[in-house]
Image: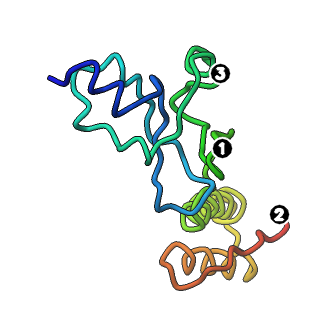
């Protein structure tokens, strides 16, 4: 158990947001801490690795939420991290396969070479051998 005075000395502000200080910014807020209400701060990042949050911000439900906030240049901002390219390609590949199945295969038709090439390009992105997300052919 940590003494309350020691906590207030180590953490001069009551509320903090943590983030990965080594990540390229903007980066996601990874935790919210009311340190003065804690009996043990051994698992709390160092104060130098967090951003102080005001009581007004802490009590604002739209500000102090578990998602949608990030850190940039020492400020807490609205932030949704980008979807990784491989995930985008995976979603696009699922959609392309569904389209080809429904609009070609089930109708007894052969998919166009455009659709075959598109799926192969998406597979290359998913597998990490390409970094270019292709544009879907016209339906």
The one nearer the camera, 62 or 121, is 62
Residue at horizontal 67%, vertical 79%? 132
- Seen from the viewer's position, the closer of residues 101 and 115 is 115
Foreground label between 3 and 2: 3
Q: Quadrant of the C terminus?
A: bottom right
Q: Residue at label 3?
A: 62
Q: Residue at (67%, 64%) from the top-left corner?
A: 100
- Residue 115: image location, x then y, percent: 71, 75
Q: Can residue 121 be seen at all in this image of the molecule?
A: yes
Q: Quadrant of residue 93?
A: bottom right
| Real-space Cα separation, disc 2 to disc 1, in angstroms | 34 Å
The quadrant holding residue 65 is top right
Location of residue 79 with respect to 53 vertically, above or below: below
State the image coordinates of residue 89 (x, y, percent, origin top left): 60, 66
Q: Nearer the viewer, mark 2 or mark 1?
A: 1
- Residue 139, which numbered label? 2
- The answer to which of marks 1 and 3 sits earlier in the sequence is 3
């Amino acid at each position: 158990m940590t003494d309350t005075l020691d906590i207030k000395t180590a953490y001069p502000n009551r509320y903090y947001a943590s983030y990965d200080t080594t990540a390229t910014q903007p980066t996601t807020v990874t935790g919210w801490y009311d340190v003065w209400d804690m009996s043990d701060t051994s698992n709390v990042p160092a104060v130098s690795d967090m951003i102080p949050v005001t009581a007004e911000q802490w009590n604002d439900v739209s500000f102090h939420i578990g998602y949608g906030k990030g850190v940039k240049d020492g400020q807490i901002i609205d932030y949704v991290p980008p979807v990784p390219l491989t995930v985008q390609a995976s979603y696009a590949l699922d959609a392309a396969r569904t389209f080809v199945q429904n609009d070609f295969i089930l109708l007894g038709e052969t998919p166009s070479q455009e659709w075959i090439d598109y799926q192969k390009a998406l597979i290359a992105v998913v597998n990490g051998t390409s970094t270019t997300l292709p544009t879907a052919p016209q339906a």
